[in-house]
Image (tube, rainbow, N blue to C red):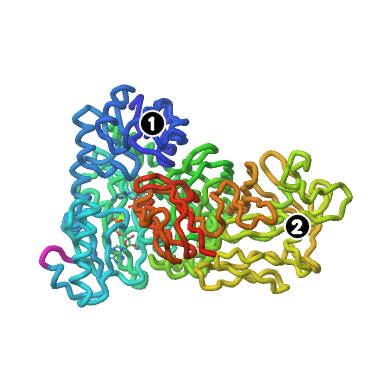
Amino acid sequence: MFSTVLIANRGEIAVRIIRTLRAMGVTSVAVYTESDASALHVRMADHALQIPKYLDMEALVAAARATGAQAVHPGYGFLAENAAFARRCAAEGLVFIGPPAEAIEAMGDKIRAKRTVAAAGVPVVPGGTGADLETWSAFPALIKPSAGGGGKGMVLVRSAAELPDALASARRTAEAAFGDGTLLIERYIENPRHIEIQVLADAHGGTVHLGERECSLQRRHQKIIEEAPSPFVTEAMREGMGAAAVEAARAVGYTGAGTVEFIVDGVSGDYHFMEMNTRLQVEHPVTELVTGLDLVELQVRVAAGEPLPFGQESVRLRGHAVEARVYAEDPARGFLPTGGRVLALREPSTARVDSSLAEGVVVGSDFDPMLSKVVAWGEDRKAALRSLDRALAETCVLGVTTNIPFLRALAAHPDVVAGRLDTGLVERVLPELALSADVPADALAAAALAFHTTPPATDPWEIADGWRIGDPAWTTWRLESRDGVHQVEVRGLPASGAEVRLSDTGAGVRLSDTGAGVRLSDTGAGVRLSDTGAGARLSGTGAEALLPGDGVVAARAVTEGGELAVTLGGRALRFVMVRDGDTLWLGRDGAAWTLTRHRIGDPGDRPGGAGGGDGVVRSPMPGTVLLVKVAPGEQVSEGQPLVVVEAMKMEHTVTAPVQGTVTELPVRAGQPVDMDAVLAVVSSEE
Ligand code: ADP
Ligand code: ADP
Ligand code: MG
């Protein structure tokens, strides 16, 4: 067995590999880049070395040599499916913990992979290449880059008329993304389910499969929630697909852990080989939870020359496992990437969590936005989903906006609960899932109470109102969040008994228009929020629980150990809380909100902002300024593009919120910007 292994990766997968190495008594070596110095894998490894880039083969080999590592684990992504890196390791006398370079090559090209496995008797999706592309006549069809991966560059074609343009555009994308414009076309499988088989092979001829994972819950061909076993797969299907996957692996002389992906017709159950991923897969934990195996340990043992310690007949699946991928992205803003420093973190103990998170870790825009995976196990599917939901609700990340509320809503969707899955489901049900950024009334009340606990003598904000014990005067808190500015009034002492109301009207609630195009109105039965056409979409905030009768609610609040315990009208709630001056972060049930307090009578004043009220233009995500389209002093019209920000290869054009003059323009092309950084200020003509 190796005494030292270098991990050529980062994030949750590096952390997960370190865990197994530690359990095996193997010394772990981490590498990290400048922007990853705060990362968890750096803290956890036995040794950590800085390198210029994760793709820098030279630096990786040097790091292995400097630390005496005998083997390299590539994780997934980066160099995991790079045959040149596998060869380079071998040339340096390092064991690459993965398949032989020839197997990576044979499977790395989709055209060649399909040919190879078809020759071995594995069913493939009917398709064509080369001259077939132009004359293809079975629609709908899917064009794919042969060298593609990560769901990039695929184009769906509905009719012959669309074909020439689709081919031209797919070729351009493939060339730009993969440096290879070779395409293939495939029949588009209707009601498609993505079901894949985990395989394991040793260097002594032993090859087994570990059953399937269903990965049909995808957005833009990227997996979101995966499970094992699939609710669709029968024992007979499993045997057939498993045998086909083993054949596919044998056809290329595979060793180590790999995944054979099938596209399955959700009506007929016919399955077809799509591709083989020659590496550990993101979603491998669901297989580990139902088989009881440690795939990383098996990868390491096989790479060290050991035979597989079991045969196919002893592989047993027990119970059900579901994984949800936690991303630094904002479902309420079109899934734009987010970022920031993790200020507070709670991770559940009732489920497996493969995480890259720790308090103090900075999440930037340089890397894949996946932060962690929450993986739940249950005796059956229903129990696993219930456990997943509870684990997600117990997860709290303050400082970085995540997709956790979206994951909970998706996992609770009736079609998901019923196991009626296909790869188009997520996109279809998006409008039904509440993806709003609005702050619920209980969180607003809790935030006001938290601010209110500050002793007045040390807090200049409160001097204007000046509450005194026994004084019935209300203190008004203006709290700004991403959905606008809210008014909450408090009187009394939160610790011993206070009252709170969310408005200055007797009706209970009046959340005021923020000028951003959203109008919020009280209906008596809670809160109804309506869109005025400016692009916002808000849903109910559940305020009714808070607002009986006259809208004044008896409240108590105490802070203890980073938590805020609040009682509102007899209802007890706990929030994870972090406060920094005028900004408060609150988290509960997997969701999180950031609230900044304002001075009353100063509507345009944004603490820490550039002033100027409505004309302040901020970056919607952490990223890099790609283009600045205006100059200081320039007259602009409302909606005119000002700045283009790029993150994770997505471009976002930021436009002028009002007509006026560009009075401030503090950014330049190429400059990195944080989320909410001021990009420009437009002063409107009076
Ligand atoms: P899975 O999620 O099933 O493991 P993916 O194809 O989504 O498989 O890829 C896993 C990881 O590898 C992703 O995090 C993605 O960033 C990375 N990855 C895969 N293919 C590519 C590619 N061609 N270019 C860049 N990154 C890739
Ligand atoms: P990548 O290498 O980018 O992962 P895949 O060939 O694995 O490319 O396809 C990615 C996703 O596209 C699949 O998970 C599936 O959702 C969809 N897909 C691929 N091929 C087909 C097909 N022939 N019919 C329907 N959907 C498909
Ligand atoms: Mg794939």
Q: Looking at the image, which residue is at 27% across and 52% down?
A: 276
Q: Is residue 92 above or below residue 661?
A: above
Magenta segment, which residues? 124-131
Q: Is residue 654 magenta?
A: no
In the depicted view, which residue is nearer to us: 504 or 465? 465
Going by the numbered disc 2, the residue's amino acid type is Glu
Q: Is mark 2 within 8 Å of ligand 1?
A: no
In the depicted view, which residue is nearer to us: 306 or 641? 641
User: x, y (%) of residue 660?
Assistant: 47, 62
> Which quarter shows the C terminus?
bottom right
Q: Determine the CA span between mark 2 and mark 1.
A: 51 Å
Mark 1: give few (<14), some (14-19) or many (20+) Cα within 10 Å: many
In the picture provided, is 431 more to the left or to the right than 234? right
Q: Which mark is residue 489?
A: 2
Q: Which of the 4 image quadrants contains residue 63?
A: top left
Mark 2: give few (<14), some (14-19) or many (20+) Cα within 10 Å: many
The residue to which callout 1 is attached is 30
Ligand 2 rendered quadrant: bottom left
Q: Main secondary structure of the magenta part?
A: loop
Chain-order first, disc 2 or disc 1: 1
Going by the numbered disc 1, the residue's amino acid type is Ala
In the picture provided, is 218 more to the left or to the right than 116? right
Query: Looking at the image, do the residues carrying marks 2 and 1 touch, with CB atoms under 8 Å apart?
Result: no
User: x, y (%) of residue 267?
Assistant: 36, 73
